[in-house]
Amino acid sequence: MANAFLNLLRANAKRSLAAVLCLALCACSSLKPWQNHALRAGEAAEYDGREQLFDAARIPDVLVVASFSGGGSRAAAFAHAVVGELDSLPYAWQGRTTTLAREIDMVIGVSGGSVAAAHLAWHGTAGHLARFHEDFLAQDFQSRLFRKSLSPSGLREISSPWFGRGNILADQLDVVLFDGATFGRLARLESRPYLIVGATDLSSGAEFDFTSTQFAILCSSIDEVPLSFAVAASSSVPLLFSPLSVQVHRDGCSPAQDAVRANAATAGDSARVKLTKGELGALATGERRFIHLVDGGLSDNLGTRRITDYVAQMGGIGAVLQSLGQGSDQSGPLPLHIVFIAINSERQGPLPIDQRGQVPSMLEVADALIYSGLGRTSRETGLVFKEAVDNWRAELAALGPAGRNSDIFAIEINLSDLEDQVLRKRVLEVPTAFRVSPEDLAALRQAARLSVASSTELKRYLESVAGP
């Protein structure tokens, strides 16, 4: 994304210089962007996931969790195309005809994938499939951002010490996609999956998830958070966009902080659980007044590490299901099918600098440091997730007959796994920018078709619901 944006900047060098001079001569603005407020007395978040996860419009004994990786508009377009392909595979279950796309209970979006995830949660599956191309993919959103940044109003905004390029990104996402929508408004909509948007804490490098639990620790409410703010925070590539900030309020939220302290790491916890519990504990008990958020891909570019971390912190898949009111004597039965759909648009393999002997430029070095690091972390995340799924299957089997009747399906749709080498090279070279050409869109749709058609785990799931 950085390369494409900087190329656009060079192409408009004269205009950019004039804008910088104008900004230098103008008085600094005192404008402030949206900021999260402290919890009011007796206030409780509406958007906690329970209503969304068990929406009556969806099948009750199938739990479907989808994750959309980072990768700019390439990721958004590929995720959209894969959802469309899944929606073209109907099956009958308990007297109803449905598709996996219509049964998504939770969607996790990171960086570019968060654009598609939030749009899906806002409009529902049918609305997302019908509108997302015209709402976002057909637009040159990147040029729109550039024009806004160099407009008089944009220059006035970023002259404020509280307002940065990340805030301009949030504002433009709101204008183009979300029209003032907040997480609280999502809570009042039916037939929508539960949305989690992932960002990264700039100071600690820890995952920061836009959830009711995370904001309760800040003594704040997820309900008032604009979707555009969450998506912009998740997409704010360092240096290209400024961080977006949330305030830590201390008064009146001892229950949330006490809960974090009560769940402190123990000697029996794994190293990863100790790390994540320690990060939450530091957030609840520390002296920080603000948290500055950057691209979610820096902490988890796939979205699946957030799942494994949460399940591990809770004490296993059984504990998670029981907390949701499933699998205990006093609650409903275990889901017969738990389906994870991980859509990964991340580029992998050699970089252009690996094909020549010249000294890489500073920009190429920065690009390699960010994206090569993400690739290695993502490979580790994928291995951790596979191991976790195996452990969860064993845990369910140990719960007795009900658990043995349940199964977990891990459907991974990866651009880098395409068998067509020419097409794979073509789509992985689509820039991680905020625009995508019609030709690139067509290639990504073809890649989605081939990827979904070749998924053995998807075939296993469809065979399991087809019955004998």
Image (tube, rainbow, N blue to C red):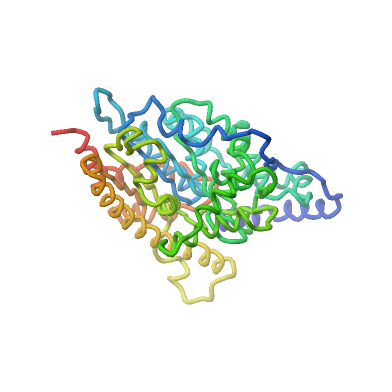
Is 43 displayed left or right of 458 in the figure? right
Instruction: Residue 82: give x, y in percent of width and height.
Output: 37, 41
> Is 303 situated above or below 104?
below
Residue at 58%, 38% in the rendered image = 227
Picture coordinates of residue 149, whole percent (x, y): 70, 47
Residue 154 shown left or right of residue 339 in the figure = right
Point out the residue furthest to the left here: 468
Visible residue check, residue 140? yes
Does residue 56 appear left or right of residue 181 in this picture? left
Q: From this viewpoint, is residue 455 visible?
A: no
Residue at the (24%, 39%) spot, across then down:
402
In the image, residue 253 sits, relative to residue 387, either above or below, namely above
For the C terminus, give its image quadrant: top left
- Closer to the camera in the image, 83 or 45: 45
Residue 416 figure quarter: bottom left
Q: Which quarter of the figure has residue 380?
A: bottom left
Residue 326: horizontal and vertical position, in percent?
Answer: 35, 37
Residue beneath the point at 42% across and 45% down:
67
